[in-house]
Image (cartoon, helix red, strand yellow):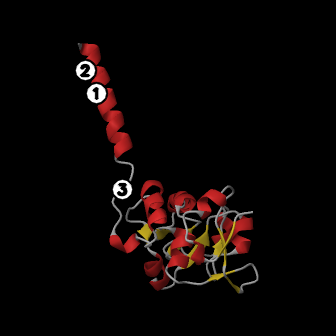
Amino acid sequence: MRYLSATTALLFTLLLCTCGRAQEVPENLLTGYAPLDEKLARTVTVDEYAISAEAAAALSNAKFLDAREHEEFTVSHLPAATWLGYDDVDLSRIADTEKDQPLVVYCTIGYRSERVATKLREAGYTNVYNLYGSLYAWKLAGFALEDARGQPTEKLHTYNRKWSTFAPDSIGEKVWK
């Protein structure tokens, strides 16, 4: 009997952990594209550090930091963004940044940037946001992207073919190689 109680408790705990995977997402963070919103609710944390594309664009004196690989950055990135990287985050690229300056970190959807934002907070930066939905949310909100030359581009690096399905075809030319 004791064995059944322990087993039942374990199964109940596992059930609770797996059923609640999708989190409640505030209206202001939704992108309006259901496949992306569903993926984000299960992948990227909604907390006090999550910021929408519209709110990020309205931030005064914000510095945008790209937490993707350099190849992705050269295809398309937010205007005037600084490439920080993901696998080899190089904080020397923002050495001249004040610790309290607003920093908005982004990647393709917000998963990698969430981790880089945590590293920045651990390094003493105090005003760090994760762009919820990241590059996809930015583009879906109607904001521009630029290429390696600083020229406007309709290309959108989607990380890989699978991740490209989380953005509508109307978002621009999807690139993943």
In the picture of the structure, the residue carrying the numbered disc 2 is 5
Q: Earlier in the sequence, mark 3 or mark 1?
A: 1
Q: Quadrant of the C terminus?
A: bottom right
Residue 15: quadrant of the picture: top left
Spatial CA span between label 2 and label 3? 29 Å
Q: Nearer the viewer, residue 140 or 54?
A: 140
Q: Judge from the rendering whether residue 16 lies leftward or rightward of residue 39; answer left or right.
A: left
Residue type (three-letter) at the residue carrying disc 2: Ser
What is the number of the mark on residue 23?
3
Q: Judge from the rendering whether residue 157 lies leftward or rightward of residue 135; answer left or right.
A: right
Spatial CA span between label 3 and label 1? 23 Å
Residue farthest front in this picture: 169
Q: Quadrant of the N terminus?
A: top left
Q: Residues within 10 Å of mark 3 (few under 14, many from 20)?
A: some
Q: Nearer the viewer, residue 55 or 34?
A: 34
In the picture of the structure, the residue carrying the numbered disc 1 is 9
Spatial CA span between label 1 and label 2? 6 Å
Residue 93: quadrant of the picture: bottom right
Q: Nearer the viewer, residue 135 or 176?
A: 176
Residue visible at 73% across and 66% down in the picture: 70
In percent of width and height, residue 107 lies at 59, 66
Residue type (three-letter) at the residue carrying disc 3: Gln
